[in-house]
Amino acid sequence: MLVVAAVLAALAITLAWPAPLALASAAWPARAPALALALWQAIALSGGLAMIGSLLAFGASASGSLLAGLRDLLPHLVDGPIPEHYGVFEIAALTLAAGLAVHLALNLALTAVSAERERRRQHQLIDLLSEPLPGQPGTRVLAHPVPLAYCVPGLRTATVLTDGLIGALEDDELAAVVAHERTHLEQLHHVVLLSFRAWHSALPWFPIANRAERAVSTLTEMLADDGARRTTGAEPLRRAAERLGADAEPFAYADAGGVRPDPDLLEARLRRLDDPIQPLPLVERVGIVATAFILVATPIVSMLAILG
């Protein structure tokens, strides 16, 4: 049991610092943003499970299995006494594991509720202040001079454009912007971003959480660019992105689960649109998928083993 705890602790430390740093600084994610996004999700999920699992494994080492330990401890939590083979460190590890699991789950739930509340508010405002765009189902137009485009996810989705945007862009550029926003909605990027925003909220003092959220935001923008590129080509999208700048998506969309405007993110997108995408070799793609699978499977199998 102590060996399992040590292995999971080592995995948690690796996924908490060196692995995210290496992935955030790597060049290949721009060539395969979907795979990179899957790997980021595997790192986050595996890291959380490994942290909790290492604490559970250490706490359960006193009784040989987690289920046996719970049978020993639960009847005595109120009336006592605690079984003698449980020391302070084992009790502390089990308590910390439970507290960490509850903390992460509550932050995810609160972040989801907050985002859903903001999405509903946005839909109400859109219904009141905008008009449908003829020939474009699900697209609304706001009477506003600032060129803006954003999407509001949820059970009922909407792509929102302003008069200023429509007046500033050519037809092919406008089509590229709409395709970009619809790709966000179709691929449910707000759901992916929500989990990383919750992680950052749960561990605000943890620098990797912020780095992960920024990296994932960039990847979702690249995926949306790819969706627009398939519809209109790269050049109209590039021209539209340059004209809109970092203000293409307002903060309301970010509060509802989207991406906050970021000049660095825009620069990364423009660099990628300048050059043809060179797909990763098949061997590398398979290796990334296998790595993501192993990362998630390792703590799950380990935690099943400590149940007894």
Image: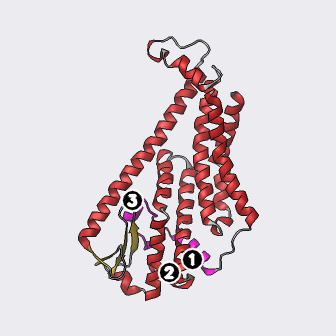
Quote the CA–CA distance across marks 1 and 2.
8 Å
| Residue 170 visible in the shown view | no
Residue that appears at 53% across and 14% down: 82
- The answer to which of 247 and 70 lies nearer the viewer is 70
Nearest to N terminus: mark 3 or mark 2: 2
Estimate the x, y position of residue 42 in percent, counting from the top left: 61, 51
Q: Is residue 257 magenta?
A: yes
Give the position of the C terminus as an image quadrant: top right
Q: Secondary structure at mark 3?
A: helix
Nearest to N terminus: mark 3 or mark 1: 3
Q: Is residue 171 magenta?
A: no
Residue occupied by mark 2: 242
Is residue 162 found left or right of 295 in the rendered image? left
Q: Please tell me how crowded label 2 is: few (under 14), some (14-19), or many (20+) other residues with Cα within 10 Å.
A: few
Residue that appears at 58% across and 53% down: 41
Tell me, yes or no, whether the two marked residues, 3 and 1, touch with CB atoms within 8 Å.
Answer: no
Q: Quadrant of residue 234?
A: bottom right
Estimate the x, y position of residue 126 in percent, counting from the top left: 29, 69
| Residue 167 visible in the shown view | yes
Residue that appears at 60% across and 57% down: 38
Residue that appears at 45% across and 82% down: 175
Quote the CA–CA distance across marks 3 and 1.
24 Å
Estimate the x, y position of residue 249 in percent, counting from the top left: 42, 70
Is residue 147 found left or right of 33 in the rendered image? left
Residue occupied by mark 1: 270
The magenta stretch is 245-274
Is residue 103 found left or right of 278 in the rendered image? left
Q: Secondary structure at mark 2?
A: helix
Mark identifier at residue 255: 3
